Image: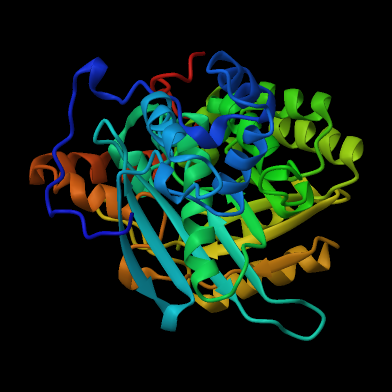
């Protein structure tokens, strides 16, 4: 359902506010066959339901035209055909970027971004959706709008998958097809790893969405046990590391869980993943003027990744409220890119997209949460400035880790 959300969305706080029915998109054929058998229905109807969910992209039981009407009410009583209650869409970049703000059953707000890239010499047209795995985030990176919201809860498997189905529906209306899925929206995917793995399984299952694993990217800001678990499972999707700094004192500030899993440990786990899967690791590096774009940072980053099966994406920082930082100038980004290429490290400079619609992670949800009091903003800015100045001197942060990132 696509609609404009009200300016202020009521957010229920009761533990029982969430709809208890499981989302239909989280179920596989075996689950559906068992449910149908309990009702005396033939097993082949499981395939009909799966086709309606994944090929038909149904949002209501009434859209499941191959099922008898008598089964529609049973489906509605047992499941949510779509876990997204409402969606507000914002369009930017001449239609190339679509930001979705999604309302869930308990009032939680999450975001997805659908990006369109035209075909170029040597590459086909791409339609990529960036999806959320949590409502809010516990990591607390200070340049990320989601970090301002704090952590609310993990998403259910169907709540993750229904973001993909919503994007696929919009594309289908124009005769296009989703080509890539990236877990880089709100939240830390590896802190909701079981649900993320269930979602990846559904997306790559030929009987469901049928997207090749190599067209799926799972991002992490450095949860080393989660990376190790992914490596043991051996999936062929792309691993992306939200790096943002190569020196521990600075990364302590920019990515607080670095105090639990330092940068060298993160890169070592990523290296093992690349060797096990044969897939190069993508390193995301948000460029912040005067903070992580110095010659010292360029040298540290080149030395950290030299010889790795890796690719670096340099991303000028999107403006985020309540932070004192701005994006690095393009010439500075290009200079750092040149240093990395000279060290034999492949680099892409990503252009910021959708800034006028708040397309960076968490910006729309933060906007809906409202402005915090001015004194709170001032104290936060002072603390960030002090911490970054100390980090640039090489001093490690002594602040406690954020909730959920225990020592």
Q: Nearer the viewer, residue 106 or 283?
A: 106
Q: Position of residue 397 (x, y in %)?
A: 45, 29
Seen in the picture, residue 201 relative to 15 is either above or below; the reply is below
x and y percentages locating residue 191 in the rendered image: 54, 26
Q: Which residue: 80% across, 36% down?
A: 235
50 relative position to 290: left or right: right
Q: State the residue in front, 217 or 377.
A: 217
Which image quadrant is residue 351 in? bottom right
Where, by quadrant of the figure, is residue 311 drawn? bottom right
Pinpoint residue 200: horizontal percent, then vertical percent.
Answer: 66, 38
Quadrant of residue 320 in the image?
Answer: bottom left
Colour approach in the figure: rainbow
Above or below, comparing residue 397 to residue 270 in the picture: above
Which of the pair 341/396 is nearer the observer? 341
Q: How many marks?
A: 0
Residue drawn at x 85%, y 48% is 279
Residue 84 seen in the current view:
yes
Image quadrant for the N terminus?
bottom left
Please state if 96 lies on the left or on the right of 6 as rendered.
right
The location of residue 199, given as percent across then percent down, is 61, 36
Q: Is residue 379 left or right of residue 192?
A: left
């Amino acid at each position: 359902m696509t609609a404009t959300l009200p300016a202020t969305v009521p957010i229920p706080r009761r533990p029982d506010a969430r709809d208890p029915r499981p989302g239909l998109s989280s179920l596989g054929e075996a689950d559906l066959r068992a449910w149908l058998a309990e009702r005396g229905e033939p097993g082949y109807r499981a395939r009909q339901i799966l086709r309606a969910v994944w090929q038909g992209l149904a949002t209501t039981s009434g859209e499941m035209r191959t099922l008898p009407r008598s089964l529609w009410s049973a489906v509605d009583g047992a499941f949510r055909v779509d876990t997204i209650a409402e969606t507000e869409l914002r369009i930017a970049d001449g239609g190339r970027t679509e930001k979705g703000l999604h309302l869930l059953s308990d009032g939680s707000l999450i975001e997805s971004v659908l990006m369109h890239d035209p075909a170029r010499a040597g590459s086909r047209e791409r339609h990529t959706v960036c999806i959320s795995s949590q409502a809010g985030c516990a990591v607390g990176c200070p340049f990320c709008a989601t970090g301002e919201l704090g952590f609310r809860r993990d998403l259910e498997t169907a709540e993750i998958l229904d973001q993909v189905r919503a994007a696929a529906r919009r594309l289908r209306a124009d005769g296009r097809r989703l080509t890539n899925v990236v877990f880089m929206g709100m939240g830390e995917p590896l802190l909701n790893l079981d649900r993320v793995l269930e979602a990846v399984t559904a997306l790559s299952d030929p009987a469901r969405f049928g997207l090749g694993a190599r067209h799926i990217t799972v991002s992490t800001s450095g949860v080393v046990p989660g990376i190790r678990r992914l490596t043991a499972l051996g999936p062929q999707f792309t691993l992306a590391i939200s790096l943002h700094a190569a020196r521990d004192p600075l990364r302590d500030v920019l990515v607080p869980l670095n105090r639990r899993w330092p940068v060298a440990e993160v890169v070592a786990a990523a290296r093992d993943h690349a060797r096990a899967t044969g897939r190069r690791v993508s390193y995301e590096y948000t460029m912040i003027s005067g903070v992580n774009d110095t010659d010292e940072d360029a040298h540290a980053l080149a030395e950290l990744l030299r010889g790795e099966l890796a690719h670096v994406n340099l991303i000028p920082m999107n403006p985020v409220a309540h932070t004192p930082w701005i994006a690095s100038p393009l010439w500075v980004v290009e200079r750092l890119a040149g240093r990395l290429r000279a060290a034999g490290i492949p680099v892409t400079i990503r252009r910021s997209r959708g800034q006028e619609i708040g397309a960076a992670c968490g910006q729309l949800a933060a906007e809906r949460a409202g402005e915090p009091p001015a004194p709170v903003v001032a104290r936060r800015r002072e603390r960030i400035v002090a911490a970054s100045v100390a980090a640039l001197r090489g001093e490690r942060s002594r602040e406690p880790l954020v909730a959920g990132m225990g020592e």
